[in-house]
Image (tube, grey):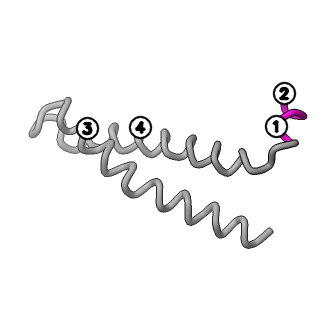
Amino acid sequence: MIEGLSAYPFIWPLALLAIGTVASLIGGALSGYTIAGRDLGAEVSTQIGGLFGMLSGIPGIALALLILALMA
């Protein structure tokens, strides 16, 4: 399977962006629940944390991938 994916090098940055987006969503949701779970309720704090996690995670991941592409 890896041999087949190496023929399409443009897929890797998109895959890494998707993995990073999911990781930032999960991290934001967990931190939102931890910080404001009792004050706002579990569902609302998790949703807000996930939103803010993605808002900060996606540009950071995209910038890191851009810097890595320019270094190569």
Per the model, the C-alpha gap separating discs 4 and 2 is 28 Å
Q: Are marks 4 and 2 in contact (CB under 8 Å)?
A: no
The circle on residue 20 is none
Badge 4 amino acid:
Ile
SS at badge 3? helix
Between disc 4 and disc 2, the foreground one is 2
Q: Are marks 2 and 1 in contact (CB under 8 Å)?
A: yes
Per the model, the C-alpha gap separating discs 2 and 1 is 7 Å
Per the model, the C-alpha gap separating discs 3 and 4 is 10 Å
Per the model, the C-alpha gap separating discs 2 and 3 is 36 Å
SS at badge 1? helix
Between disc 2 and disc 3, the foreground one is 2
Q: Which residue is mark 1?
A: 5
4 or 2: tag closer to the N-terminus: 2
Q: Which residue is mark 4?
A: 26
Q: Characterize the magenta stretch by its predominant secondary structure.
A: helix
Q: How many marks?
A: 4
The magenta stretch is: 1-6
Badge 2 amino acid:
Met
Q: Which residue is mark 3?
A: 47
Q: Residue at x 50, y 61 (%)?
A: 60
SS at badge 4? helix
Quarter containing the N terminus: top right
SS at badge 2? loop
Residue 56 appears at what percent x and percent y?
39, 58
Q: Residue at x 65, y 69 (%)?
A: 67
Q: Residue at x 28, y 44 (%)?
A: 49
The circle on residue 1 is 2
3 or 1: tag closer to the N-terminus: 1
